Image (tube, rainbow, N blue to C red):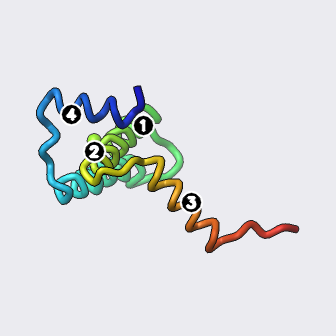
Amino acid sequence: MKLIELIKEFRETRKWNNNSEASLVKSIVIESAELLEHFQFQEKEYDKELVCNELADILIYCHALCIKLDVTPEEIVSNKLIDVARRYPVVKD
Ligand SMILES: [Mg+2]
């Protein structure tokens, strides 16, 4: 099962699939702040498990927003990479 389908089923079975787009965007930012908190006072030492836990929260909300927008992470990331590659072509030595 693809990750987005797993997240969709997980949220649907708990009736957590009624969040608005705005609510999901806020959650992405809140979870991003929680991730940043691990680097608040120092930049080199961090607990990888705790950092990955916050990263997972962010990814789950990003996938939930993709579901709400009826897009897939694959299509929007691929489109973005195509756009960035067009703007920043590889410079050959
Ligand atoms: Mg969190």
Q: At 28% across and 44% down in the image, what residue appears?
A: 64
Question: What residue type is disc 3 on?
Answer: Leu
Label located before the other in sequence (2 or 3): 2
- Say which of 80 and 23 sits in front: 80
Q: Position of residue 20 (x, y in %)?
A: 15, 54
For label 1, the residue is 52
Judge whether 55 appears above or below 40 on screen: above
- In the drawing, does residue 70 fall left or right of residue 90? left
Question: What residue type is disc 2 on?
Answer: Ala
Judge whether 46 appears above or below 84 on screen: above
Callout 2–callout 3 Cβ contact below 8 Å = no
For label 2, the residue is 64
Mark 3 C-beta closer than 8 Å to ligand 1: no
The N terminus sits in image quarter: top left
* Picture disc at residue 81: 3
For label 4, the residue is 11
